[in-house]
Image (cartoon, grey):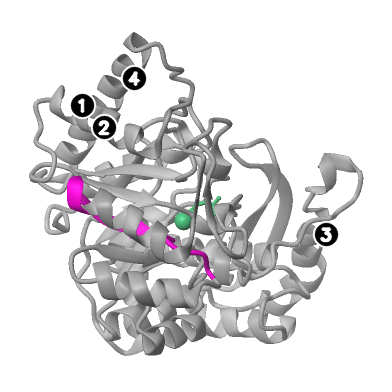
């Protein structure tokens, strides 16, 4: 039985050049594994706490306290443990913190260890990380799951908090739902992405990119973004609605002022029901099959209304709404709001709790979508997580920028090496 013999954390940097936590776990048989923790910009208010130093250096964003928490407080708790026991180790970390939102030790400290433990366990067993996650799902929940390659939502046009342009909706995504395998998913998305770049450039728009690799032009309306994407799909000889669907992440909390939804680009102030009519108009006109955070996280009446109106024909995803938290998800299920959940492990802080939330979604016929954060690293764990937990969908940015592409490249390798694991349709 291998034992954890060393835990060592340092401060590294994410894709925005902002400090984040990295952890190395070493076993007594010499095996070692690394993790790096991602970070959001348009965060939900109920997310687990990301501990920052709040001191002068790094504009307050240093994570040296979180690093020190790992090296000095958490390491002694996990030394000598067998990394296969993810549940037991995560529980020790959760109990030691003792708060609901991991605010004593920081979710970034706890997650860095939790991720590195799972990497070490997979390496020690000489199995793929996705195979280890498949086993963990069974061990932690008692239920079996079928692994699959997730269908991506590629965020090819960025707005909101992730870009300097005027567009209100944060993410305009394409879903290559008609592709026969993951290689074709990548071919289509890459071609559409580059056709969109050509269209933007030839129309005099900026083709510089936002935090998640999507283009970030200034446009007159949010709808114009959809029209440009449709043009790029058609110029790739693909059919909107048949080969490719469109998904939106409104991240609506970012433009809700407590009363109205303020669309700056269009000079509109819409009440909750007016904004829902606005979205319904887009869904009726375009092949939009998924909308995330359509409504502010506290506008529960708005969520009920949009779920009644669009819940049958559209995937309505709760991100800031549920923050990967099983208790908040259960409350939402009772309130009949949304029909899907975005899964970001740093919103909750451990692999175990992430698996438990996905299990809860599965039991309640909610779809899950594994997601990156806008501040990412070269860590590709979410690709294996999506495969091993059979989650079916992944959202990890544009087919551009290495911190996004790293996850898609990992999925290409999984497809190449595991011919029995098929693309989810
Ligand atoms: P974030 O954005 O990582 O900045 O929170 C991603 C999202 O809202 O889905
Ligand atoms: Zn979101």
**Regarding mark 4 in the picture, which secondary structure is present there?**
helix
- Rendering coords of residue 49 (x, y %): 69, 67
> Mark on residue 255?
none
Q: Residue at x 44, y 52 (%)?
A: 250
Q: Which residue is mark 3?
A: 65
Residue 282 left/right relative to 30: left
Q: Nearer the viewer, mark 3 or mark 4?
A: 4
Asked if the residue under mark 4 is in contact with the one under mark 3, i.e. CB atoms within 8 Å, the reply is no
Residue 377 in sight: no
Q: Which residue is mark 1?
A: 231
Rendered location of residue 167, percent (x, y): 48, 37
Eye-nearest disc, 1 or 3: 1
Q: CA distance from mark 1 to mark 2?
A: 6 Å
User: What kind of element bears circle 3?
Assistant: helix
Query: Residue at horizontal 29%, vertical 23%?
Result: 196
Distance CA(mark 3)–CA(mark 4): 42 Å
Magenta residues, as a range?
Answer: 284-297
Q: Report if the CB atoms under discs 1 and 2 are less than 8 Å apart.
A: yes
Q: Residues within 10 Å of mark 4 (few under 14, many from 20)?
A: many
16 or 304: nearer the viewer: 304
Mark 4 lies on residue: 197
């Amino acid at each position: 039985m291998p034992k954890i013999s060393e835990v060592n954390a340092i401060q590294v940097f994410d894709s925005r050049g902002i400090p984040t936590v990295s952890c190395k776990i070493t076993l007594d048989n010499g095996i070692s594994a690394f993790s790096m923790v991602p970070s959001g910009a348009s965060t939900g208010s109920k997310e687990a706490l990301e501990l920052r130093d709040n001191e002068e250096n790094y504009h307050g964003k240093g994570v040296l306290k979180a690093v020190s928490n790992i090296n000095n407080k958490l390491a002694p708790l996990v030394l000598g443990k067998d990394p296969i026991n993810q549940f037991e180790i995560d529980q020790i970390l959760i109990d030691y913190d003792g708060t609901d939102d991991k605010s004593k030790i920081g979710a970034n400290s706890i997650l860095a260890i939790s991720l590195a433990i799972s990497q070490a366990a997979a390496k020690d067993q000489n199995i793929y990380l996705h195979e280890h996650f498949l086993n963990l799902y069974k061990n932690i929940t008692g239920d079996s799951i079928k692994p699959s390659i997730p269908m991506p939502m590629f965020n090819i046009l960025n707005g909101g908090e992730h870009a300097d342009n005027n567009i209100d909706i944060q993410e305009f995504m394409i879903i290559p739902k008609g592709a026969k395998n993951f290689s074709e998913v990548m071919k289509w998305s890459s071609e559409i992405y580059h056709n969109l770049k050509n269209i933007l450039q030839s129309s005099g728009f900026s083709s510089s990119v936002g935090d998640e690799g999507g283009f970030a032009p200034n446009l007159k309306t949010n709808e114009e973004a959809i029209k440009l994407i449709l043009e790029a799909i058609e110029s790739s000889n693909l059919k909107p609605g048949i080969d490719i669907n469109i998904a939106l992440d409104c991240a609506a909390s970012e433009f809700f002022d407590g009363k109205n939804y303020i669309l700056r680009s269009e000079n509109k102030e819409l009440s909750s029901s007016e904004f829902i009519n606005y979205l319904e108009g887009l869904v009726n006109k375009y092949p939009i099959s998924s909308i995330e955070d359509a409504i502010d996280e506290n506008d529960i009446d708005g969520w009920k209304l949009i779920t009644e109106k669009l819940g049958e024909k559209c995937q309505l995803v709760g991100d800031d709404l549920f923050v990967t938290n099983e208790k908040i998800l259960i409350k939402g299920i009772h309130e009949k709001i949304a029909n899907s959940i975005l899964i970001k492990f740093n919103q909750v802080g451990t692999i175990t709790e992430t698996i438990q939330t996905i299990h809860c979604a599965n039991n309640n016929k909610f779809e899950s979508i594994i997601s990156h954060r806008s501040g990412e690293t070269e860590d590709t764990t979410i690709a294996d997580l999506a495969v091993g937990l059979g989650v079916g969908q992944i959202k990890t940015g544009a087919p551009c920028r290495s911190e996004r592409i790293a996850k898609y490249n990992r999925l290409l390798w999984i497809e190449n090496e595991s011919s029995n694991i098929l693309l989810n349709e």
